[in-house]
Amino acid sequence: MSNTTLIIIGIGVGLVITAIVLPILLKWPWISLFLPWIFQIFKLFILVRFPITGVVDITVFLFVLLTIFLLVGLFLKKLVWDHRYTGLVCIHFALAAVFAISYSWTTSPEYGFRKLGLFAIFNIVAFALGVSTIRTLSDARKVVKGYAILALIISSSLIISPSYVYGSKWQLRDSFAEASALNVAYFLAIGAISSLIWLREKKWRLLAVVIWILGFVATYKTGSRAMMVQILFGTVMLCLFYRGSYRVVRSTVVLLFLMAGLAVALSFVGKIHSRIFDILEDPAYWIAKSERPYLWAAAIKGIPERPLFGHGIGAFAMNQKGVDARHFPHNFFLEVFYEGGLVSFVLFILFWGLLCYYLFFWHRWNRRYAVMGDQYIGDLWITIFVASGLAAGMHWDISGQRFLWLLAGIAVGTVRACSQETMLKWNDDQEYYSIEEQVEGEHGYEMAHLYD
């Protein structure tokens, strides 16, 4: 079939899928938060088996669908939108505008154009999706539990897969949906932390332990160092961050760490091949071999050459590697400063600074007035976001950070929902006590009149 025919078929299929999926998403908006992950994990699997995807980019189709869903949902008031989000969106587009100006002098026009489009559109759609679909704390709980269950399914499938156990050095890339190890490991790390939602519930605590251990073991097998740190850091952070941590929760966290250490130790005894195994066996060699310190040094060295507006979006690839392809410093702060200059860096810091201010402003209110269970779900999503940021910031370029933008949106949406629900309960209580005092006052006046 010709490309034109495939495009026509792709558009027709897209319209049919949109007509079917859109009403479902408008009925249950929180389901939309699973689509970006599922598409990313199964993308290569779909590309290999459906030739139409070679002409019609399914990632573009997904974000067109999500954009339509957002516009329709906000118009029909099926989604929520706080006025504070508008300022963040404006800062994002101001940053994208500076990058667009810098494109005129970039040395990597092909990579820079794709990077600009993905960052300007996909990242902000992901953020808007997160903040607007979390309407209540119930939505936040459904999503975090769904992420944990999906991680359980994926990690179980990986561990029992023969190709996963006996495959090449990068087993995960060759065994599960033909996906990149980092894409799957990143979600497994998020799913493992998400499972901690059940630590406060005695009857579900064992499930939390099982998901956490399976997620950790599967992540270990991928060889992703950052994602392992993400799981461990997030677990410790939640235990320290949540002021209502019970003794049994802290004991469970200690048990998880002991079991994680046992899993790593057994891999040494059994000589189970993994990138982590190689690093622990000869750390000096791997530290010397790592290219990231050199990339960071190159970015820092190049910043003073064009400090105000940078070298142009995507220029790091050509300037450092000599190719117009995906290549970046593996640190998104240095990446923004190098390619967009001081102006872009200030806008980037302003975006994240303002987002974190809203996040912790609402969180502070929740800590004072919300009940422990509501606080816990907010603390959990903040933990997932912060732990994921540590890993994502060192792995993908800013155009590949849409999942971090999505998690940031979910975290902000969750603490806002918690704050709003707490405020409504507090106002109801104040109104109740006000009426009660008024009734008591009236009865007191009547009794006093009788005794006169």
Image (spheres, rainbow, N blue to C red):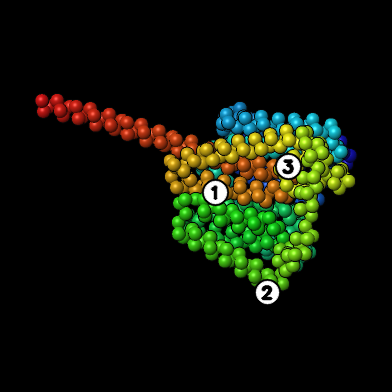
Which residue is label 3 attached to? Answer: 398
Disc 2 secondary structure class? helix
Residue 407 in percent (x, y) is at 62, 44
Q: Residue at x 15, y 28 (%)?
A: 448
Which residue is label 2 attached to? Answer: 269
Mark 2 Cα shell of 10 Å, populated few (<14), some (14-19), many (≥20): few
Q: How many numbered marks, from 0 up?
A: 3
Disc 1 secondary structure class? helix
Task: From the viewer's perspective, tell me whether residue 83 is left or right of residue 442.
Answer: right
Q: Earlier in the sequence, mark 1 or mark 3?
A: 1
Residue 418 in percent (x, y) is at 49, 40
Question: Whole-Å distance between the Cαs marked 2 and 3?
Answer: 40 Å
Q: Residue at x 52, y 38 (%)?
A: 361
Which residue is label 1 attached to? Answer: 380
The residue type indicated by label 2 comes to Val
Q: Earlier in the sequence, mark 1 or mark 2?
A: 2
Q: Quadrant of residue 217?
A: bottom right
Residue 431 lies, with reference to residue 250, above or below; the image says: above
Residue 313 in percent (x, y) is at 80, 37
Q: Residue at x 56, y 39 (%)?
A: 359
Task: From the viewer's perspective, tell me whether residue 309 is left or right of residue 30.
Answer: right
